[in-house]
Image: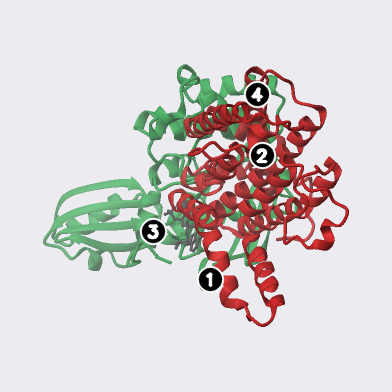
Chain colours: A red, B green
Amino acid sequence: MTSRREGSPFQGLATVALKEAADHMNSARIHLVMLLVILTAIGSVYAAIGQIKMTVSEDEFLFLRLFTTAQQPLPSFVSFLGFLIPLVAIALGFDAINGEYSRRTLSRILSQPIYRDALLTGKFLGGLLVIAICLLALWLLVTGLGILLLGLPPSGEEIARGLAFLFASFVYAGVWLAVAMAFSTVVKSPATSALCALTLWLVFTVFWPMLAPLIAGALAPVDPLNPMTAVHQINLQQAIARVSPNVLYGEATLALLNPATRSLGLLFASQMNGAIMGAPLPLSQSIALVWPQVAGMIAALLVLFTIAYVAFQRQEIRA
Amino acid sequence: MTPVIEADGLVKRYGRFTAVDGIDLTIGKGEVFGLLGPNGSGKTTTILLLLGLTEPSAGSIRVLGLDPLRQPLQVKRRVGYLPDQIGFYDHLTARENLAYTARLTGLASAEAGRRIGEALGRVRLADVGDKRVGAFSRGMRQRLGLAEVLVKQAEIAILDEPTSGLDPQSTQELLEQIRELAAEGVTIVLSSHLLSMMQTICDRVALFKRGGIGLIGNVAELTTGVLGGTHVVEVEANGVDLPCVLKGLPHISAVSIIRPNHWRVDASDDVRAEIARKVVNAGGALQSMTIRQSSLDDVYVHFFEGENHDVAA
Ligand SMILES: Nc1ncnc2c1ncn2[C@@H]1O[C@H](COP(=O)(O)OP(=O)(O)OP(=O)(O)O)[C@@H](O)[C@H]1O
Ligand SMILES: [Mg+2]
């Protein structure tokens, strides 16, 4: 593209973002996915409450256990979220750009005084706005249910941890929105881009946890005479697993919602020096613990968005 | 006449295929300028280049004295565009669709509302303004696209095949609207395959041929340039070899046979009397004779004779 351009690349950005957000809020597709999320949320939280009430224990963070307690056969609220957030994000973004092509609206919109930057970024921000609203609503719903059914309010730290968890979920959703939008720019047909994004989702949620040990085993075989090779393999396996945003999100939520979590990798005896087993970490330390995970997700989001950006800038209006 | 669009040696290549091949073009303020040519001859590509919607491979463009590549926002603010294949957001109403683009253009909402109401009235969509565009017919969408150009109050309106999908009445109305816009001083660039319509409204036309402009000028210039005359006389006569008989007669540029005993004479004047005299003098029997002004149709057919259409990429 030309080196210097007149005017702001963000001209029209807010208009696009608000229109996209309003479209999503009115779309049957999103209503359906949200309904699914809300039903599973209520289901898992309800089950968790039953479980919590049965176990009579002194837990400083009873409220947080709403999110993490699993009642067989239902998984916990956070596992559900890790599984469903990508679906919501994909539903929001899979046809962002190729949908404009197939509806033949692109040349008309780009003949208005805006840059392509504003269209792409506006669509991304519009999607993020919807995600933020939905996550916040969901969190309030769960907290409300908790107050009603457990009969006690969350503590200040629990609210703070809840908000940190909300932020991590938001970033996680952003990654999947960026995935969906990247596919929507690179792939011409909306149906195909949806399939691509869903395939990736399936790979990361279902197959990646199985693949990571296999790959690590092949790359770094364990030498029975050298115990460090076993450590090496486990580290490698963890590194490979962390390519998946789902794993990063899982680790982040684990440390944020379970204050006793002291490490997200192998734990060596030296790290346990002076630590009391099961003693909770202060919030600031939990955040420090998950910061690499969250930063990793933000980096992935930026890389994916850049791919979409570059691809879109180079595209012909008629393609 | 101040030029508002200037293109100089404009080239657009898609890979190894050259869609626009060295176009020079100057369009003056207030002109109605027509782009003609077979499918795939580069009209739409030229339009996209003018709007800065695609980058030229070579050459330069000025629109309203601005470079569409370096100052795209200013150009797009002042130029309205009706794409050849127009699409709207089907889940929004006509009014909402126009309001969205008006916001993108930077119009204040009160002003936009006023202009939208007026534009919808002008294209006869006022009573369906609050209906979803998903239920619109092709011609209605086309007219909605024109309404969008009207809302923008552009100085240049670029209309790519605005008549496609329009019924005869709407075509006629479109003609009226184009004339009104032109009367208001708006420069209009339009492409269409309706030659008779182009002839009636265009001040000048350019004939595109394989990415280049083969001919450019007003209809009279083109008819004399291509056909050598402004009149076409069709003659039916028996017992005479017309081309031989008419040889050397002034004003006559070409005599061609349509079918046995039936000829077409291109001339720069009304030559019926001379033809009649020559035929009778040569002992022939004149059956019939008709005269008409040569049209864009004649120019087009003559110019593209022997061309195979659909120049594919
Ligand atoms: N994105 C593209 N990639 C490759 N070739 C293209 C692309 N867009 C257009 N072309 C080619 O450029 C040529 C000119 O196309 P253009 O659309 O300008 O023709 P046109 O004169 O508008 O035709 P029509 O009357 O059918 O609208 C065509 O041969 C077309 O195949
Ligand atoms: Mg065209």
In space, the residues marked 3 and 4 are separated at their CA atoms by 99 Å
Q: Nearer the viewer, residue A205 or A123?
A: A205
Q: Which residue is labeled 1 in the image?
A: B15
Q: Which residue is labeled 3 in the image?
A: B251
- In the displayed structure image, the side of residue A34 where residue B293 appears, left or right: left
- In the displayed structure image, the side of residue B68 where residue A98 appears, left or right: left
Q: Along the polypeptide, which appears first: circle 4 or circle 2?
A: 2
Residue at coordinates 61% horizontally, 45% vertically from top-left?
A110
Q: Is mark 1 within 8 Å of ligand 1?
A: yes
Q: Nearer the viewer, residue A115 or A263?
A: A263
Position of residue A227 measured from the top left corner of the image (x, y, whole percent): 70, 76
Q: Nearer the viewer, residue B181 or B20?
A: B20
Residue A128 numbered mark, or none: 2
Element at badge 4?
A: helix
Is the same chain shared between marks 4 and 2?
Answer: yes
Whether tag 1 and tag 4 are in contact, CB under 8 A, the answer is: no
Position of residue B232 measured from the top left corner of the image (x, y, whole percent): 32, 52
Image vertical order of residue A199 relative to residue A239, above or below: above
The amino acid at mark 3 is His
Q: Chain of mark 4?
A: A
Element at badge 2?
A: helix
Q: Nearer the viewer, mark 4 or mark 2?
A: 4
Image vertical order of residue B181 relative to residue A269, above or below: above
- In the displayed structure image, the side of residue A168 where residue A70 appears, left or right: left
**Residue A230, can we see it?**
yes
- In the displayed structure image, the side of residue B148 where residue A60 appears, left or right: right
